[in-house]
C-alpha cells in the first residue's frame, strides 16, 4: 500500500479545486491562447467534421508542439467521437486530450513502511530548474509531515551548492554538501548515510546539469546510481527528470535519451508559464508514457502543481472551472 504524498485531485475541497484550476489556467494561458487562436474558424461547429475543421485542429496542435503522433491520435479520436456525441468541438478535444494524458497521471508516492530514506535522484540539463524544483518539492513533502533532506550533488558549480544550501536554510531542511569539485557519487552516498542516521523519510538528491549527448557526464550519473545501490539495492527509488517546457520538442529528445541511458521513473515539467508550446506534454505522454509528477507554472512555491490529466486538458481550452465542468457533461 502506497501513501500519496500529495492530496489526490479527486479528494480536494471544492474551494481548493477552484483556486488551483485558476492558477493552472493562468499559468498555461499562452499555450491556451495559441490553441484557441488556431481553432477560431472551427469553434462554432456543432455537428459534422469538415475538412477545414480538421486541418485547423491539426495545425493548432502542431503549432503548440503536441508532436505528430499525439496530434494524429487526438484528431482521430475527435473525428470518431464527434460523429456520435452531443459535445461541441472544444468539449470533444478536451475529452480526447484527457484520455491521452490519463496514463501519465501518477502523484509522487512513498511507501509508508519504507525502511530507510526514500531516495529521489533529480536529473536534467542546465537551466531546467532542478534545484528550485527540488526546493518546492521538499517544501510540499515537509508540509505533508515527512522528514526531508537535500543532497547537493551538483558539485560542478559552487553556486549550485550555495543555492541548495540557501533553500535548505529558508525551509529549515538539512543539506548535505561538500566543496565544489567533490565526487558527486560520494556526496550523495554520504547524504544517504546521514539521512538514514537521522531518520529522514525522503532524500532529494541534486545533480549537475548535463546534456544527454555528454557521454562522460551521463556515465557519472550511472556511477551515482551504482554507488547509491551500495546503500540500498533498490535505490534510487525514483529518478526524476526535470524538463524545461520552453524547449519544446527538444525536451522530448532529452527525455528519450536520458531514459535510454539511465532509466527514468518520472518527469516534471517546468516553465510552462513561459511558453506557448505547452503541447509538449502530449508528445511526452504519447512517445514515452512516463508518469508526470508535477508541472511548474512560475517562481512561487505554489506554482508547482501535482499533474492532473483532467485539469491540464480543461485548462488548455477553458478559462474557468465552471467551463471545464460543462465540457464533460
Image (cartoon, rainbow, N blue to C red):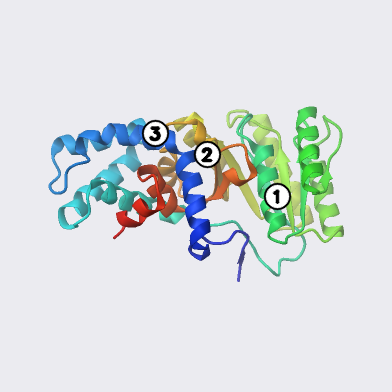
Label 3 element class:
loop
* Label 2, label 3: how far apart the Cα atoms are: 15 Å
Nearest to the eye among marks 2 and 3: give it: 3
- Work out whether residue 166 or residue 207 is closer to the camera in this orientation and state it: 166
* Residue drawn at the location 71% of the way across and 66% of the way down: 114
Nearest to the eye among marks 2 and 1: give it: 1
Residue 298 lies left or right of residue 104; in this view the side is: right
Mark sitting on residue 138:
1
* Residue drawn at the location 62% of the way across and 29% of the way down: 127
Q: Which residue is mark 3?
A: 65
Please identify the quarter of the rendering in which residue 67 is found.
top left
Q: Along the polypeptide, which appears first: circle 2 or circle 1?
A: 1
> Is residue 105 visible from the viewing direction of this image?
no
Where is residue 11? Give x, y as percent: 52, 65
Mark sitting on residue 255:
2
Q: Residues within 10 Å of mark 2 (few under 14, many from 20)?
A: many
**Above or below 67: residue 136:** below
**Above or below 127: residue 322:** below
- Work out whether residue 27 or residue 135 is closer to the camera in this orientation and state it: 27
Q: Along the polypeptide, which appears first: circle 2 or circle 3?
A: 3
* Label 3, label 1: how far apart the Cα atoms are: 30 Å
Where is residue 287? Give x, y as percent: 42, 43
> Is residue 207 visible from the viewing direction of this image?
yes
Amino acid at each position: 500500500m502506497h501513501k500519496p504524498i500529495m492530496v489526490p485531485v479527486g479528494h480536494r475541497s471544492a474551494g481548493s479545486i477552484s483556486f488551483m484550476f485558476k492558477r493552472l489556467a493562468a499559468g498555461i494561458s499562452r499555450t491556451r491562447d495559441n490553441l484557441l487562436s488556431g481553432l477560431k474558424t472551427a469553434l462554432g461547429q456543432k455537428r459534422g467534421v469538415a475538412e477545414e475543421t480538421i486541418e485547423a485542429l491539426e495545425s493548432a496542435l502542431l503549432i503548440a508542439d503536441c508532436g505528430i503522433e499525439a496530434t494524429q491520435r487526438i484528431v482521430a479520436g475527435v473525428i470518431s467521437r464527434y460523429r456520435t456525441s452531443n459535445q461541441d468541438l472544444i468539449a470533444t478535444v478536451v475529452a480526447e486530450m484527457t484520455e491521452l494524458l490519463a496514463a501519465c497521471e501518477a502523484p509522487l508516492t512513498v511507501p509508508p513502511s519504507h525502511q530507510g530514506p526514500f531516495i529521489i535522484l533529480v536529473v536534467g540539463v542546465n537551466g531546467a530548474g532542478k534545484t528550485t524544483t527540488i526546493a518546492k518539492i521538499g517544501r510540499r513533502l515537509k508540509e505533508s509531515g515527512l522528514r526531508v533532506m537535500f543532497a547537493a550533488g551538483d558539485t560542478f558549480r559552487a553556486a549550485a551548492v550555495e543555492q541548495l544550501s540557501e533553500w535548505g536554510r529558508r525551509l529549515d531542511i538539512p543539506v548535505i554538501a561538500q566543496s565544489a569539485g567533490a565526487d558527486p557519487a560520494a556526496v550523495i552516498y554520504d547524504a544517504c548515510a546521514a539521512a538514514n542516521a537521522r531518520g529522514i523519510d525522503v532524500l532529494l538528491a541534486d545533480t549537475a546539469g548535463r546534456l544527454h549527448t555528454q557521454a562522460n557526464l551521463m556515465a557519472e550519473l550511472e556511477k551515482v546510481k551504482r554507488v547509491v545501490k551500495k546503500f540500498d539495492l533498490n535505490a534510487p527509488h525514483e529518478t526524476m527528470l526535470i524538463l524545461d517546457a520552453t524547449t519544446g520538442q527538444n525536451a522530448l529528445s532529452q527525455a528519450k535519451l536520458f531514459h535510454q541511458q539511465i532509466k527514468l521513473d518520472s518527469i516534471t515539467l517546468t516553465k510552462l508559464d513561459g511558453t506557448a508550446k505547452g503541447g509538449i506534454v502530449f508528445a511526452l505522454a504519447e512517445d514515452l508514457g512516463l508518469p508526470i509528477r508535477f508541472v511548474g507554472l512560475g517562481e512561487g512555491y505554489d506554482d508547482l502543481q501535482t499533474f492532473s490529466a483532467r485539469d491540464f486538458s480543461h485548462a488548455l481550452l477553458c478559462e474557468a472551472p465552471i467551463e471545464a465542468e460543462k465540457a464533460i457533461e
